[in-house]
Image (cartoon, rainbow, N blue to C red):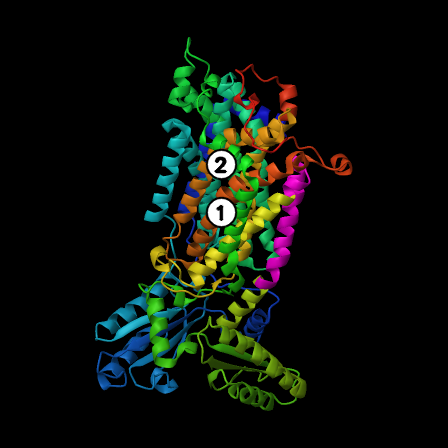
Amino acid sequence: MATFLYGIGRWAFRRRRLVGGLWLGALLLAVAAAAVAPTAEEEDLSMPGTESQEAFDLLDERFPESNAQGAEARLVFQAPDGQRVTAKENKAAVKDTLGSLDGGDQVASTTDPYRTGAVSKDGTIAYSTITYSADARDLTAETKSALEDAASKARDTGLTVEIGGSALEAEEAPGGTTEIIGVAVAAVVLVLTLGSLVAAGLSLLTAFVGVAISFGLVSALAVPLGLTDTVAILSLMLGLAVGIDYALFITSRYRDERARGSDPEEAAGRAAGTAGSAVVFAGATVFIALVGLGVVGIPELTKMGLGGAGAVALAVLVALTLVPALFGFFGRRVLSRTARRADRPGSAHPASAENGRPGLGTRWARFVLRRPVAVLMVAGLGLGAVATPALSLELGLPGDESKSVETTQRRAYDLLSDGFGPGFNGPLTVVVDASDAADTRAATDQVVKTVRDMDGIASVGAPVLSKTKDTAVLTAVPKTAPNSGDTKDLVNEIRGAVSGVETTTGAGVLVTGNTAMNIDISEAMSDALVPYLAVVIGLAVLLLMVVFRSLLVPVKAALGFLLSVGAAFGVLVAVFQWGWGADLLGIEQTGPVMSLMPILVIGIVFGLAMDYEVFLLTRMREAYVHGASPGEAVVTGFRHSGRVVAAAAIIMVSVFAGFIGMSSPTIQTMGVGLAAAVAFDAFVVRMAIVPAVLALLGHRAWWLPRILSRVLPNVDIEGEKLSRHVPAPATAPDAAAQPLPVGRHRY
């Protein structure tokens, strides 16, 4: 692989105008396609194979005149202080409002709260349900405007009016102040790390090119493929983070090769062949983990995985081609000012500059080598303590209750809870399939009685029969809130209780609705979490075994990955369930962690963890295979890669943290989880636990059984074949060859 990528790097450097022109053309086409593409709408989560989805499908079949998952709006009216909504003038205002909507485009029906009894006991709050013939993503702008205009006119009469339901989804557009701050922090870190505005700008420019193309493609394909804003934001988040990091790794290696005496074209080829090989492997791990999200069976999660995987693949292609091409355009300006001065005729060779005081990475590595047990204990116990809250992890899906109080959906939710009880916002739909029953009415009455007699039920509505009289639908309102654990238990109790009705009557009974669907998806996520984690860990061990030709290094990497993921889950529980620091992060409502997050975080962090593992350990293995002792190899790896890996981690954490300020609970959870996971993995696992374990293992760390050595392919990620194929330039003596104070340990 190294030799192949070496050729690509040199070709891109020589044909830089062609490469730059091709990427510019791709960028313009993607932007143009996104500009003319229609805007996609958010869509409800679905989970094929669950009881909830089966019931929705049955309702679509037996009630073709209605859309079981169609859009719905709830207009919630509250009378002014001291008044009732049943007062003559308020009642007239409510009816006028509903009359302006009834018969409108895409409106299937509106309900009169005074006829349906949708008025609170104290008479201060009432609501009307407006159902639409299309689902939320297919509602036109005119339909939404009509709903908002009707609410606005009602407010002019003195009523408080809020809109709940799925008709108006508060969509979060990418871009904002916090994201800009994250990018600004990344720019500062790049400048401090590389010592060159040009080199820092190169990394940002190439990352933006990849992100713009991927974001444009997602936007252009949003409607035909049903891609949501969350998919676009995830591709933006991942593409920006890995794009900057991959460009940084290759740029750093290019500067190292220039410091060793290589000419610019040769340095570009060697950077692509060595650091580029690590980029390909790291990107491939992220890609595989994200694509693997499709096995869970949730279409939305599959789309998120594919969108993120596409952004990562583009970041890899940009790093391997556009970055070497820009080396040719910028020339010596990619080097730091110190390196440019040292590269002038008559100046000392840059490689001799490292004769002074060792850098922070070298000093830290030597410290760990002297005290590996202490470092390992502190780091391991610290991560274990942070991960402890993960034992209380509860999964759920955010509803209107998790939205900002600035949104009308959240205010409508609160009004309905105050007027009708917390369970009113999460009604359960019970579907009675009596096609095989002897008596539809008798079966339905028995189901109604069974459900109504349950302790957790506040009320049960009158059943509605289909035109063919073989299916009945009834609505049951729980006493507890939708995301409450009691509501989850209630759904399971209902499903267990109606099994007796199915046996005695021959009717099929299904429990569905958004609340039941969320519960089913959360349970499916919990069930899939361990198998997915096992697959990811197994893949990590296998891939690292191929890369590092070692048995113990992959096992150590997998255990470290589990520690960082566990600690990230602990942070998610502490922040989103327990509310620790929630106000500081702008999180207004605590509750269960979004059910998609654990698997999504595992998939993404797996690949990112392998990034740092590969970039740090390739330099260590490179030194080891060239004759360095295990201790010397650790110090060499930190000397050459420690600072760059730390900078890359700070950049990635900054980018992820920049998305915490968005109002979408999905994006907030991703931002917190990914930022925490990357910070723990890079600075605790890779910077502390990895060198401590390698110090304790010594030569055993790089041992591979003979049978595996013969079976496993040699991908040569450290460029050993490249060194034989293309002799390296002569350099000044490397400080790595000097004796190292490694304390009491022998290597």
**Which residue matches tag 1?**
680
Residue at image x 42%, y 24%?
Answer: 334
Q: Which corner quadrant of the image does residue 281 belong to?
A: top right
Magenta extent:
526-554
Nearer to us: label 1 or label 2: 1
Look at label 2 and name its amino acid.
Val
Q: Image height check: is 55 above or below 705?
A: below
User: Does the image show residue 452?
Assistant: yes
Q: How many marks?
A: 2
Q: Which mark is residue 419?
A: none
Residue at image x 49%, y 36%?
Answer: 645
Main SS, magenta region, reads helix
Decide which of 536, 25 is in the foreground and name it.
536
Q: Image height check: is 192 above or below 728?
A: below
**Which residue matches tag 2?**
645
What kind of element bears circle 1?
Answer: helix
